[in-house]
Image (spheres, rainbow, N blue to C red):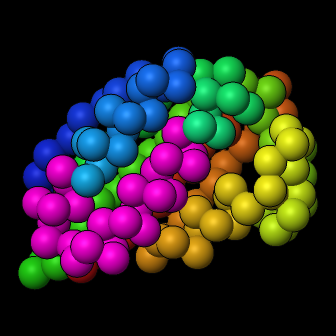
Amino acid sequence: MQVLKSETLSLLADEQVVAVRQGVRNLAIAAGLSLVEQTKIVTAASELARNTIIHGKGGHVVMELLQNGSRKGVRLTFEDAGPGIRDIDQAMTDGFTTNKGMGLGLGGAKRLCNEFTIESTVGQGTRVSIARWK
């Protein structure tokens, strides 16, 4: 797998979610994703960016345009050094929320992507990686 383009953006305030959305949309277009596929990865990115800011107390996202043979895709890796997630299975359950939301964030992001991984250590932070392929 080859990284054709990579960009890292800080996630410290709500205003930065807009920059993430725009950056992801540009990479999705460069990867040749359809409008529906673009919308899915941008929606997932928006949710994960907000989670990084709100729950993770800030962090960053690495946005990558990938090529694997003839396939192109977009991979996003969100990282924070926040409190971590005590129970990932519970956090992935639709309806579970820690902040008055609808509880669809992590599970919804997973459903919108072709690849989803999450690693979290209490007291050290969380890393979520997603990818969408053409």
| Left or right, 26 with reference to 83 | left
Q: For residue 107, what is the image quadrant? A: bottom right
| Magenta range | 26-49
Q: For residue 73, what is the image quadrant? A: bottom left
Residue 45 among magenta residues: yes
Q: Position of residue 131 (x, y in %)?
A: 40, 64
Q: Which quarter of the rendering shows the C terminus?
A: bottom left
| Left or right, 35 with reference to 115 | left
**Residue at image x 64%, y 67%?**
108
| Left or right, 11 with reference to 31 | right
Q: Which quarter of the rendering shows the N terminus?
A: bottom left
Residue 32 among magenta residues: yes
Q: Is residue 78 visible?
A: yes
Task: Give the main secondary structure of the magenta stretch.
Answer: helix
Q: Position of residue 110 (x, y in %)?
A: 59, 68
On screen, 61 above or below 64?
above
Q: Position of residue 113 (x, y in %)?
A: 47, 71
Q: Is residue 2 visible?
A: no
| Left or right, 42 with reference to 26 | right
**Residue at image x 87%, y 50%?**
97
On screen, 110 above or below 130?
below
**Residue at image x 26%, y 53%?**
25
**Residue at image x 61%, y 28%?**
53
Q: Position of residue 57 (x, y in %)?
A: 68, 21
Q: For residue 86, what is the image quadrant? A: top right
On screen, 24 above or below 62?
below
Callout count: 0
